[in-house]
Image (cartoon, rainbow, N blue to C red):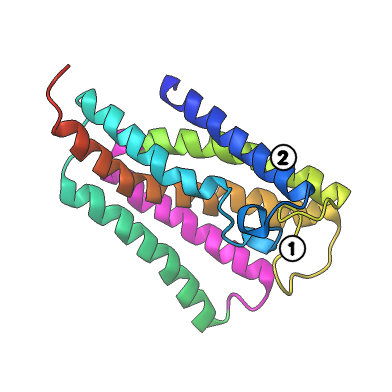
């Protein structure tokens, strides 16, 4: 748990910086207010690979290498494929006819992706889950306040064609559920892939 304290604090700082930038109408390239974030440069999605590599490096230096490089890379890639396959099957089967249903489908896909990716390197997987939860809880809280108060940020911007509903219910669908599933899975899968790179670097350094 000590390993995630500083990364979680940095991630919280990025979240607050992003929120402040949007509230002050900062440059869209840095602080986009579009639904989903608009790939703005200030955002915690970009730090997941950095901390994934750092965790992999630290575990590698501690002697906790993955069971095998092929497995450590192959299972996260299979997890990502599983996530998108679930979405594709749901679309073909007509299970994602509404925005709510689409979010639910991808939430299920995210849980399956987690189940596939974590066995690739259990030590790193557990570490990344803990970090992802610590990173995403503050975002869910920010989204709750943003939706209730109507801040006009990407945190309270509903997805396109999302049905009108009461604020708390909208937060459950667009805030809590995605943050607890889709974004946790993203953090773990991407972090696992970059964690292997970090472990490779650690293995090439002489012992301390």
On screen, residue 84 versus residue 119, left or right, reads right
For the C terminus, the quadrant is top left
| 114 falls in the magenta region | yes
Disc 1, SS: loop
Q: Please tell me whether residue 102 is drawn above or below residue 58 in the rendered image.
A: below
Please name the predominant secondary structure of the magenta segment in the image. Answer: helix
Q: Position of residue 186 (x, y in %)?
A: 46, 52
The x, y position of residue 41, in whole percent, is 55, 53
Asked which quadrant contains residue 113, the reply is: bottom left
Q: Do the residues bearing badges 2 and 1 touch, measured as CB atoms within 8 Å?
A: no
Where on the picture, by quarter, is residue 52? top left
Q: Residue at x 59, y 56 (%)?
A: 40
- In this image, 2 relative to 176: left or right? left
x, y percent for residue 132: 50, 39
Residue 1 percent location from the top left of the image: 44, 22
Identify residue for label 2. Answer: 141
Give the magenta range: 95-124
- Tell me if residue 124 comes above or below residue 19 in the rendering: above
Give the SS element for disc 2. Answer: helix
Magenta-drawn stretch contains 192? no
The residue tagged 1 is 158
Q: Residues within 10 Å of mark 1 (few under 14, many from 20)?
A: many
Q: Left or right: 97 with respect to 58? A: right
């Amino acid at each position: 748990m000590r390993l995630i304290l500083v990364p979680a604090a940095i991630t919280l700082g990025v979240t607050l910086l992003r929120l402040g930038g949007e509230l002050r109408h900062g440059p869209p390239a840095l602080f986009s207010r579009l639904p989903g974030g608009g790939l703005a440069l200030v955002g915690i999605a970009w730090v997941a690979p950095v901390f994934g590599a750092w965790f992999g490096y630290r575990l590698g230096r501690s002697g906790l290498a993955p069971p095998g490089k092929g497995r450590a890379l192959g299972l996260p890639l299979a997890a990502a494929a599983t996530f998108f396959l679930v979405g594709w099957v749901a679309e073909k089967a007509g299970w994602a006819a509404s925005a709510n249903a689409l979010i639910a489908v991808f939430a299920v896909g995210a849980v399956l992706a987690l189940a596939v990716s974590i066995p690739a390197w259990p030590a790193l997987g557990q570490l990344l889950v803990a970090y992802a939860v610590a990173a995403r809880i503050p975002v869910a809280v920010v989204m709750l306040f943003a939706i209730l108060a109507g801040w006009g940020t990407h945190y309270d911007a509903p997805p396109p064609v999302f049905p009108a509903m009461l604020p708390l219910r909208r937060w459950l669908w667009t805030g809590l559920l995605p943050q607890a599933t889709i974004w946790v899975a993203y953090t773990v899968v991407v972090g696992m892939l970059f964690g292997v790179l970090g472990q490779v670097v650690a293995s090439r350094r002489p012992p301390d």
